[in-house]
Image (cartoon, grey):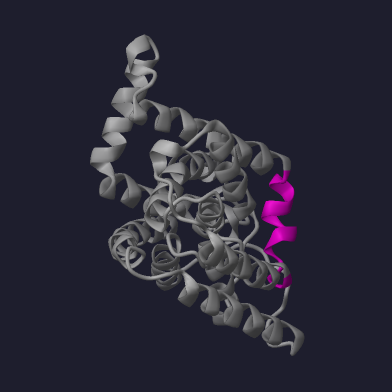
Amino acid sequence: MGWLEAIVLGLVQGLTEFLPISSSAHLRITAALAGWADPGAAFTAVTQIGTELAVILYFAPKIGRILVAWFFSLYKRDWRGHPDARLGWLIIVGSIPIVVLGLFFQDAIDHAFRDLRVTATMLIVFGMILLVADRVGRQYRDLDHLTVPHGLAYGLAQALAIVPGVSRSGGTVSAGLLLGYTRSEATEYAFLLAVPAVFGSGLYKLTDIGGAESPQWGPTILATLVAFGVGYLVIAWLMKFIKTRSYVPFVIYRVLLGVALFALVYTGVLEPNAGPAM
């Protein structure tokens, strides 16, 4: 991977990670359109660390309160009912599905799931699910209503993002809206829930960077830093956007992109299967 590719893919990662349009799909599509090799699952996982650092910075006060309350709840009974302590435990509960499915489908994540036809299908199907959720969700709950079953439902939705095209934020937000949470609360929890999952995945994939089928360390670090800066700006914009607007524009974009991707694949412009990573 060259430095230009790293900058471009870092920008794509930062721009798309928090929008419900699938950053992994956009990294895969961008590389294919540019004629570059598939950057690979390891590169995607590691650069997502940059965007999650942006989440930690943006939500630092809230994350700090959650960590303190959760720590005290370990040995102080009166802290166990604290809302922030409960949220901390529920983030752990919600992270279980992606750990299990990520390990179980590890080979498919690196190969079969990266087929562009799969990506196009997921863009369209989960775009329509987001549309339904945005339209029928009652949006009366905040995170104080979060329960263990709801946390697991969020977690299962997040776990589906191991398939490019689903979107971690899109899947999780859809689950939240269907459970009755407001757009802002569902989106905030989606961001918080992603932190342990993304850091875990990124750290797990670190050993693959620099290998024969993965990008080298220098470009990967550059892409991660670019993703961090751009991702922070996108979080700030999105949290303001969803307070007054729906997710419909993203649904339209997903469907159009999926249809265009199918057209490019079936007309032979793009090869559906991933080549070796850069």
Q: Position of residue 66 (x, y in %)?
A: 33, 31
- Comparing 63 with 275, the one in front is 63
- Identify the residue shown where x is 56% and y is 54%: 178
Please indicate, yes or no, whether residue 217 appears anywhere in the rendered image. no
Up-down relation of residue 40 to residue 210 (above or below): below
Up-down relation of residue 38 to residue 187 (above or below): below
Q: In which quarter of the image is residue 56?
A: top left
Q: Where is residue 140 in the image (x, y as percent from the top left)?
A: 43, 51
- Comparing 184 with 1, the one in front is 184
- Identify the residue shown where x is 41% and y is 33%: 87
Q: Position of residue 211 (x, y in %)?
A: 58, 50
- Identify the residue shown where x is 57% and y is 42%: 155
* 118 relative to 158 in the view: left or right: right
Please indicate, yes or no, whether residue 53 appears anywhere in the rendered image. yes
Up-down relation of residue 274 to residue 252 (above or below): above
- Comparing 263 with 207, the one in front is 263
Up-down relation of residue 197 to residue 277 (above or below): above
Q: Where is residue 4 in the image (x, y as percent from the top left)?
A: 41, 73
* 228 relative to 17 in the view: left or right: left
Q: Please tell me whether residue 110 belongs to the stretch shown in magenta.
A: yes
Q: Please tell me whether residue 35 belongs to the stretch shown in magenta.
A: no
- Identify the residue shown where x is 55% and y is 73%: 31
Q: Give the range drawn in magenta.
A: 105-117
- Give the total number of marks visible in the rendering: 0
Q: Quadrant of residue 51?
A: bottom left
Q: Residue furthest bottom?
A: 267
What is the magenta segment's predominant secondary structure?
A: helix
> The C terminus lies in which quarter of the figure?
bottom right
